[in-house]
Structures are given as C-alpha cells and as structure tokens.
Image (tube, grey):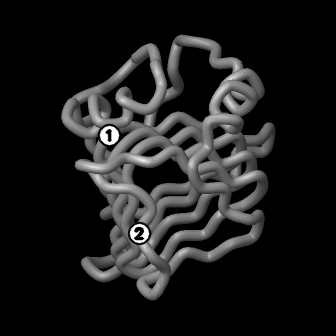
Amino acid sequence: MTQSPVTYDFNGIWAAISPLSEVAVPAGTTLSSSSPSIGTLANPKIMTVNGNLKIQGTWSGGGIMVVNGNLEMGGGCQYNGIIVCLGDVSLAGGGPADVARILGGIIYQGTIVDNSSYGGACRVFYSTEAINAAQQLSRYQLAWWRER
C-alpha cells in the first residue's frame, strides 16, 4: 500500500455518503459466512458503519462501504467496489483460507499511530468493473491508483 499524494476530506466523505446509505450496520458488528451479503457487482449497495467493523469467513458484498472506525477483514471474505475507512485497516492474508479480497479500491485515513496491517496473501485489485458498478450509486473522483 502506498500513501496517496491527494489529501482526502474523510469527514466530508462520511457526511456526503452516510445519508445515502441503503444499509446501516451497527458499530461493533462482525459479518461472517452466516451473514447475508450486502450488495453485489450486479446490484451494488451503499453500506455505512458508524464504528468498527469486522468481516470474516466467506462473507461478500459490493458497492460502496464507508466505515467510520476501524475495519478488519479476513477468512476468505470479498468486497467488490469502493471501501472508505476513517480508521485503521487490517487485511488478513496468512493462507488460502484467510485471504481478504477487495476488487475495486480502498482508501483509509488511519491513526497517528498507524495500526494498519496487511497479511502477506491479502488481495487488493483495482477493478474498473467494480468501480463503475459503485459509481452508479454515488459520484466519485479517482485520485490515485497503482497497478502491479
């Protein structure tokens, strides 16, 4: 992960997106394999969490996710779209069963301490298809991206 040369107004993003939310997930929620999906590539949703969120197992979702807190992902979960996190991000990737996958893009603010971490096998891929699907929900500006 690389720091963006653009300065984002994360509080402004939260203020603009949260009123448009189709699904408001309570703070401290853990989404797992038994939790229903929230949005897909074909039917994206705006999901907001006003606090910390943990995603594990084979949970999947798609659209725009804004987390006003910390985000922890692992256990084979996948998100297709744009993730905005106002806190720290922890993406697991210790082995095939513990790989967090993001197809689209992620931006996060982090803390001064920067407790963000990325497991060796986590996958974050820029996806035009996922970004375009999310764009149906709300306008965005692509500020920076990196391809390997």
Residue 37 in sight from this viewpoint: yes
Q: Where, quadrant-wise, is the N terminus in this rendering?
A: top left
- Nearest to the eye among marks 2 and 1: give it: 2
> Which of the marked residues, 2 or 1, is nearer the chain's N terminus?
2
Q: Residue at x 52, y 44 (%)?
A: 46
Q: Residue at x 77, y 56 (%)?
A: 51
Above-or-below relation of 91 to 32: above
Which residue carries the number 2 mark?
37
Above-or-below relation of 13 to 25: above
Above-or-below relation of 4 to 44: above
Give the x, y percent position of residue 32: 49, 81
Q: Secondary structure at mark 1?
A: strand
Is residue 15 left or right of 77 when viewed as pictured?
A: right
Q: Residue at x 46, y 19 (%)?
A: 140
Residue 148 in sight from this viewpoint: no
Is residue 135 left or right of 90 when viewed as pictured?
A: left
Nearer to us in this view, 30 or 87: 30
Q: Residue at x 45, y 14 (%)?
A: 141
Q: Amino acid at mark 2?
A: Ser
Disc assigned to residue 104: 1
Give the x, y percent position of residue 103: 29, 47
Give the x, y percent position of residue 146: 30, 26
Is residue 51 left or right of 83 when viewed as pictured?
A: right
Q: Amino acid at mark 1?
A: Gly
